[in-house]
């Protein structure tokens, strides 16, 4: 799966989102999809890459001794996945989620720019730049940073809870 999918996942990230976002919004608008869904799709597109790469790294993280031990216990591939690979991948997953949150927030801001939105951080940045209101631009940037910090902290809380449930000590 890694050999077949990773080249496509990496290739998908070579197209700048600032170029594809307006086209995606126009195409979705032409078929009647408006509102939050196009913005969510752009944010999902941007956040998929770090999570996919992190999970691939996490699933490959068990060393050969651990895999040999599982095989010694006569574990099949499904048991190795559920009992060894997925628990080993959890720290990678949460680190990737923290990165993806920041990237998806940027994607949501970029997705607001070509839509002519009147509310949201992207709209505030755009209207501030149109009218030369630097205070409005800076306040939108600070709010984006605060929002990203809060969301990353929430993922950190979820990480601590999941790892505690798995028996990992901090």
Image: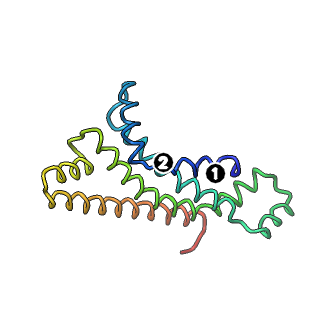
Residue topped by disc 1: 6
Which class describes the residues within 10 Å of circle 2: few (<14), some (14-19), or many (20+)? few
Q: Secondary structure at mark 2?
A: loop
List x then y, in percent, for residue 158. 47, 60
Left or right of 113, for residue 69: right
Q: Residue at x 38, y 50 (%)?
A: 107
Left or right of 3, for residue 147: left
Q: Is the residue 93 above or below the residue 1 in the image?
A: below
Q: Is the residue 10 above or below the residue 117 in the image?
A: below
List x then y, in percent, for residue 66. 77, 67
Residue topped by disc 2: 15
Image quadrant assignment for residue 136: bottom left
Q: Residue at x 74, y 68 (%)?
A: 63
Which class describes the residues within 10 Å of circle 1: few (<14), some (14-19), or many (20+)? some
List x then y, in percent, for residue 50. 52, 56
User: From mark 2 to mark 1, how far is it between C-alphas?
Assistant: 16 Å
């Amino acid at each position: 799966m890694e050999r077949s999918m990773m080249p496509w996942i990496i290739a998908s990230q070579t197209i700048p989102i600032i170029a594809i976002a307006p086209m995606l919004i126009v195409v979705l608008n032409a078929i009647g999809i408006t509102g939050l869904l196009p913005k969510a799709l752009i944010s999902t597109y941007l956040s998929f890459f770090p999570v996919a790469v992190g999970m691939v790294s996490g699933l490959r993280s068990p060393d050969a001794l651990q895999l040999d031990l599982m095989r010694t216990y006569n574990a099949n591939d499904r048991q190795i996945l559920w009992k060894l690979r997925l628990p080993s991948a959890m720290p990678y997953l949460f680190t990737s989620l923290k990165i993806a949150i920041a990237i998806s927030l940027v994607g949501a801001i970029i997705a607001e720019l070509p839509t002519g939105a009147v509310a949201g951080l992207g709209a505030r940045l755009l209207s501030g730049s149109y009218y030369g209101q630097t205070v409005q631009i800076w306040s939108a940037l600070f709010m984006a940073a605060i929002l990203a910090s809060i969301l990353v902290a929430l993922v950190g809380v979820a990480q601590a809870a999941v790892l505690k449930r798995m028996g990992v000590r901090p």
